[in-house]
Amino acid sequence: MIDIQNYWRELDALRRIAGAENESMLRAAFQNLLRDLGEQQQLIVVAEYPFKAPNGANLRADGVLLNRLRLVHGWWEAKDEKDDLEKAIAAKLAQGYPNDNIIFEDTRTAVLLQQGAEVMRCAVTDGKALKRLLDCFFSYELPAVQDFRVARSQFMVELPSVALALKELLIAAHRNHAAFQLQATQFFALCQRAIGERVTKDHVDDMLIQHILTDQIFRAIFSDASFHQENHLARALAQLEHTFLHGSTRKELLKRLEPYFAAIRRTAANTITSAEKQDFLKQVYEDFYSAYNPKDADRLGVVYTPSEAVRFIIAGCDLLAQRHFNKRLADSGLDILDPCTGTGTFIVDLIEYLRGDKQELIRKFKHDIHANEISILPYYISCLNIEQAYYEATNEWCEFNGACFVNTLENWGFDLTHTGSIGDMFGNLTDENQTRIQHQNQRTIPVILGNPPYNANQKNENDNNKNDPAVLADQRIKETYLAASTAQKTKLYDPYVRFLRWASDRIGEQGIVAFISNSSFIEARGFDGFRKVVAQEFQEIWIVDLKGNARTSGDRRRCEGGNVFDDKIRVGIALYFLVRNPALTTGCAIHHYAVNDFLTALDKRRWLSVHQLHQLAQAGDFHRIRPNSSSNWLNQPHEDWSQWLAVASKESKSGKSEEAIFKLYSLGVVTARDEWVYGFTHQEVTNKVRFFIHHYKSLRQMKADFDEKIKWSRAVKNDFLKDRRYAYNSTLLTKSVYRPFVALTLYFCRALNEMPSLQHKVFGLKYDNLAIGISGTPQAKPFQTLAVSMLPCLDVLEKTQFLPLWVYAADGSQHDNITNWALTQFQQHYANADITKRDIFNYVYAVLHDPRYRHKFALNLNSELPRIPFHPEFTQWAAIGATLIQAHAYFEQVKPFAFKRVDQKKGTPKCRLKADKTAGSIEIDGVTRLDNIPPQAWQYQLGSRSALEWVLDQYKEKTPKDLTIREHFNTYRFADHKEQVIELLARVCQVSMDTMTAIAQLEQLPWNGD
């Protein structure tokens, strides 16, 4: 209703302020209503839309709604208030206007026609009725839209098998076709020279297959372009294709895709402008990649940069170039490169931005604009898009000689030349592409902009989908960003970081790097070295933080709002400009602007469309960042706790210093295959591990390759390649805290646990110990702590670090983990020689639970390991800490809380495990309910859940994610554990009550936090 209310206000304003009465003035209000509602469904309103009537007459509709494929979703006609609406509708229909999903309105009444009949009419002042009419209009699917949807669905199903058939034809041609063998060998050698030595024959075959499958699409959309005849790579691939695939074979192979190709041809015939063709082609490209190679779609980040963001970056580069180098983007001597051009969005918009001066654009296009791409399909599309955009702007067709088919991250040295050629039919590819690369490498390129790939790491080793290695880029990262980092665990090999490192080196002594990418560099702990180095290498940094990080939770997640990439990715997004200007000698000025909280993806795109960098800068909207000594940019701790005792440090862990409370600290166990090695019973885990090892052994003996039957990881792959044997050992089964107050069986084995960390020194399989778990840094959730008395998982809390009371040597001997230095500090401060290391352990745990401490030092806790003050009343703090440890670490021994259990005689025992905090009850299943749960019990929170909710979540019946586990070992049934879970809930309820009581006592104690 908000959009309708906005419509009423705008309509009223037009009548009152503008004195508007006629259609041409008033229709803007309804058009804007359709625009706002359409944008929510990725539909756009096009006003004055030309079309042909059935009798061939050229007509023009007041407006249409088009989807991303430029298919008409619905029509709209506005009439004058003074017109007779019925007569006006009849007249329009008689002229040949559509009668299917069209709204006629005269600012007083709206009429909706579908399939030639009126389906609804209402007064526009009747909000509920107007909403129903609009809902009916937007939910309707015209036949053309439906046909395309059906054809697309068939295409998505058929494409993989057609591609496989093509692959088999290629394999046969490689074996039996002499002419093809010769030309394919030559083409492969040339691709290796042009793209890099890591290019394999499979890559080249893939390139050819993509060319064959998409050629008809390109020709349909760009039927008048000279690309197919003039582009060197298109010609070379076409010639290679014709040596083995032609005539009836080609036709028979592709006929299953013909419905889609036909739909493309019909739809492409309706696209008019270059921009429409680009948007259409992007959608087709996304469809193709998602069906043809989903892994590549993920690895390459096949998500399109919003045009609003592209224009913001281009205009920002123009501003900064003028401000720092006294040059416009259109000027000579200011080369521009998109190093990962994808479908050419940035260069296309750059052409549009520069089209005001035709002669400058012609010169710029021929000499100063460059774009690199490593994948054949986006390379094709980028060339088509860019050349078409240039034609639209100049009325001249010209091949884009700035396009290089090259792996940017392997193209280092910049003054290196690619020499050598082969004198055959593919010589043009060698000469042309390598000449382009050579030309680009010899140019000074001070402006680099674009959208680097966003996929940092594969989530599953079974995907075999890691980003390609970038040896030189990674070496430069190691020499710079990593060398300057103090983070314990730093991983900075994300593709966008590699491109930033490359671009920072490529621009030379002065220039601008402008990207849109993952925003983690702004505040992530592991990027401290990156932040330090870029502040040394650049003199000015401008950041527009668009937020949208879906990997947060609670209030923080809501504040992040939508992702500007239509919520297709989960990372936060930022636009940023890094300016290198040696004339500035006063350090680096870092400017940061964050969009408002809670904005949707659509809100953010709208914001970008009406703002520019120069406007924000002039208005003083940017916040000046002054990095602290830890290279933090945002959320810098304001509270100084440096005089307090560190709970741990890298120096104490390495033995270089004793000036910390704990010597050793360790992450929890990282298995990389939780579903395989964790379970509710010993027998369950045994069955899964035996299957895993048996399958591993079978593949090893057959010398087979990795498959998807078991969960591979880096370490297991390495063992497999080294022919290492695995054997099941029942003594490796142990109890482990998997999530808060949930203990499972774990197969604790170095081979099948990717990162055991140092837990073999802490708990191992048999050691008696206690450890304080604390949130790792940085945290997406509020700081947490939990004591454990058994082997813990990394994810008990959030990237959990554990501080053990004792450590064990290889011979099993027990040693104190609290340092003698810490004991001396406490004994001397409190003048009490009776203080023990166990007392200190208890005291630390109490301090970490104090709400005053967590609130005041929240930013400190998010950026480094905790520091502990000397509070008055040490003994009382330690006593409360001891109470908390007893409740948390030994939760299975706590006396159960006295629930009221209600069992119904009728009902089905279907698992529910659903909490009703308001009613103070838990629905166990269709039979049993637990009542009389005190409100206080829900207040004990660990992260985004209460302790009780953690138990409920872990014991629910869930479908395993792993396909093999789902097929063979999906045996968990809540009914088998019902009584055990009810007892556990009773114990955890009492733990929660005791915890909140203890915390209330802590808050009454004096403290040294001021």
Image (cartoon, rainbow, N blue to C red):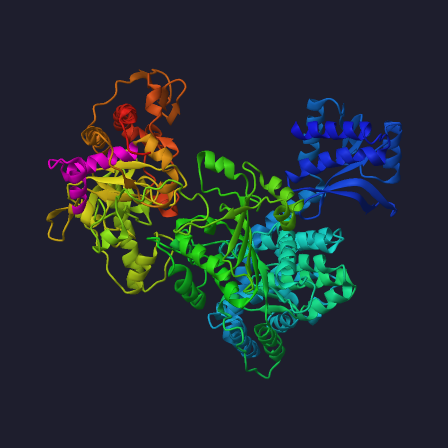
Residue at 57% from the left image edge and 79% from the top image edge? 179
Query: Quick check: can you spot residue 215?
Result: yes
Task: Please name whichever residue, 587 or 748, is drawn nearer the observer in this view of the structure.
Answer: 587
Q: Nearer the viewer, residue 209 or 771?
A: 771
Q: Give the quarter of the image for residue 792.
A: top left
Q: Is residue 988 left or right of residue 581?
A: left
Residue 358 in the image: above or below residue 545? below
Magenta residues, start to end? 821-849
Which quadrant of the figure contains the C terminus? top left
Q: Report if residue 233 lies within the magenta region.
A: no
At 76% from the left edge and 53% from the top edge, which residue is drawn? 272
Give residue 61's position: percent from left, percent from top. 82, 41
Q: Total number of numbered labels?
A: 0
Q: What is the chief secondary structure element of the magenta stretch?
A: helix
> Is residue 255 in sight in this rendering?
no
Q: Residue 492 lies in what quarter of the image? A: bottom left
Find residue 421 and report its horizontal and vertical position in percent.
57, 82
Quadrant of the image occupied by residue 849: top left
User: Against 776, is 397 above or below?
Assistant: below
Q: Position of residue 332 (x, y in %)?
A: 68, 68
